[in-house]
Image: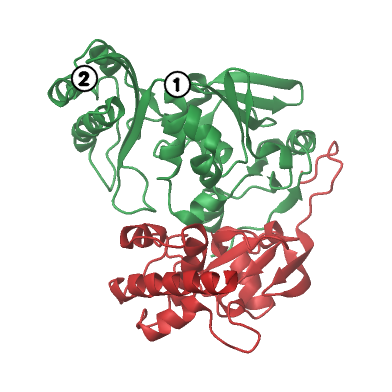
Chain colours: A red, B green
Amino acid sequence: MSSGTAAPSQATSTSSISVTVDGSRYTDTVESRTLLVHYLRETIGKVGTVIGCDTSNCGSCTVLLGTADDPGHSVKSCSVLAVQADGANVTTVEGLAGPDGSLHAVQRAFHELHGLQCGFCTPGMIISAVDLLRDNPDPTDDEIRDGLSGNLCRCTGYQNIVRAVRAAGAELRAQVTEVRR
Amino acid sequence: MIPVAFDYLRASSVDEAVAALAGAGEDAKILAGGQSLLPVLRLRLSAPSLLVDLGGVPELRGVREEGDSLVIGAMTTHDEVSTSPLVRQFAPLLATMAATIGDRQVRHRGTLGGSLSHADPAADMPAAAAAVEARYVLAGPNGRRVVPASDFAVDLFTTALGDDEVLVEVQVPKLEGWGSHYEKFHRMVQAWAIVGVAAMVRRDDGAIASARVTLTNMGPTALRATALEQALAGCAADRAAIEQACAVAAEGTSPRDDLTASAEYRRHLVQVLAGRAVAAAAGV
């Protein structure tokens, strides 16, 4: 019953997908039911992206889902099928640092301002902060809290996370000014 | 948590999606943004044999003007609805409401059509779409038909969509000169609204000339608060008069008792939220 005779394309229980993750292209056969986060962690070994809740609440599995031309936007990779990412570009926390290993401004700010304690929420927090600062380079504290409301932290009380995002925003704005000069 | 195995088809056109549904019967599900469906599949509360993904149908995404209406594609995300200049100008209620759905990640994936078709009584989109008197365009094997918002959701998680039909776009009559607001109460951003109220108000100087009020999670579908709308017509546009009128906000509703709130609590809450929503829409 799974493939209607009238349908020109064939419905399948496995698919070959091609995804660019953190700048490298991967081609794999996946089951239709495979979640993007399981593909990232188990098939291609991107274990920097973690699974916190498995219920779409916590945001630890947040990645950027975009195209070759556009880094796209934050999504919860537990709520996207791997097959839906076919042809897409995915950025995980492992793809933020420069080629020489220099940390992204958001990563550096979380490190320097102690925006974490146990660290489990951090990969998702950092990706969400990167996405937020792209849309809103100079957010107020309230806008930061609202922008990160899809990411739960059970350690910090969020204070240092908000400070880190504010500092990273300032640094990213300074970098833009520097480039324009 | 891993869903039960299913077949997957990435449709490249509406016709292809409809044909696949027609061939598969009631065991098939449409996959839009997946922000309601994938959690349900992961929990194995549903086990469809086929998912037909609309993500590869570009014409289903975006907002355009068509005469006196805006036409919003069913695959337009909540984020796109909330930031669209056209929606902000001609249907600001939809934009302000969409910005309150879930969190950023959910709004980047979740879609207008997906939310409406899922017909969750606690979802925000159906009430707002009813308040703007949207019309839904459904595509099926025999062509397209248009269903008004008031006739689309028929019961809990149940709509007028046939097994072989797809919601393809939503027509929203352009409205100017109305104030609007969406007010909801929930415990955290990812939680459903315990109660939500969408209000649209057209003022005539110091009085409310006309009002539309719709309710989230006060019955099996989004409801129109007709008693309140009548009480507000001609009501003075001040807080005390509006709050007094909102005493009838729960008339004709049938809220549930559940883990988050009792029906009695919801009947009280809807009066408070209606007062806030109508006052904000009236600009007082």
Tag 1 subunit: B
**Placement of A97 over or under B16, stated as above or below:** below
Residue B29, position as x, y percentages in the image: 64, 42
Quadrant housing the N terminus of chain A? top right
Q: Residue B237 carries which label?
A: 2
Q: Do the residues labelled 2 and 1 touch (CB within 8 Å)?
A: no
| A162 shown above or below B226 | below
Sequence-first disc among 2 and 1:
1
* Residue in the image at 69% along x and 78% along y: A44
For the point 41% across and 80% down, the residue is: A110
Question: x%, y% of residue A19?
Answer: 73, 67
Q: Residue A132 carries which label?
A: none
Name the secondary structure under disc 2.
loop
Judge whether B203 appears above or below A176 on screen: above
Residue A60 seen: no
Residue A30, located in which quarter of the rendered image?
bottom right
**How would you rate the neighbour count of disc 2 (Cα within 10 Å): few for under 14, some for 14-19, many for 20 or more?**
many
Check disc 1 and report the residue beneath it.
Answer: B176
Q: Residue visible at 43% across and 54% down?
A: B103
Q: Disc 2: which chain?
A: B
Mark 1: few, some, or many residues within 10 Å (few <14, many ≥20)?
few
Q: Quadrant of the C terminus of chain A?
A: bottom right
* Amino acid on which the number 2 mark rests in the picture: Ala
Q: Which residue is drawn at 59% across and 79% down?
A: A94
Looking at the image, the residue that sits furthest to the bottom is A100
- In terms of image quadrants, where is residue A147? bottom left
Instruction: Using residue B108 as the reference point, say whether residue B14 is left or right of it.
Output: right
Check disc 1 and give the amino acid type. Glu
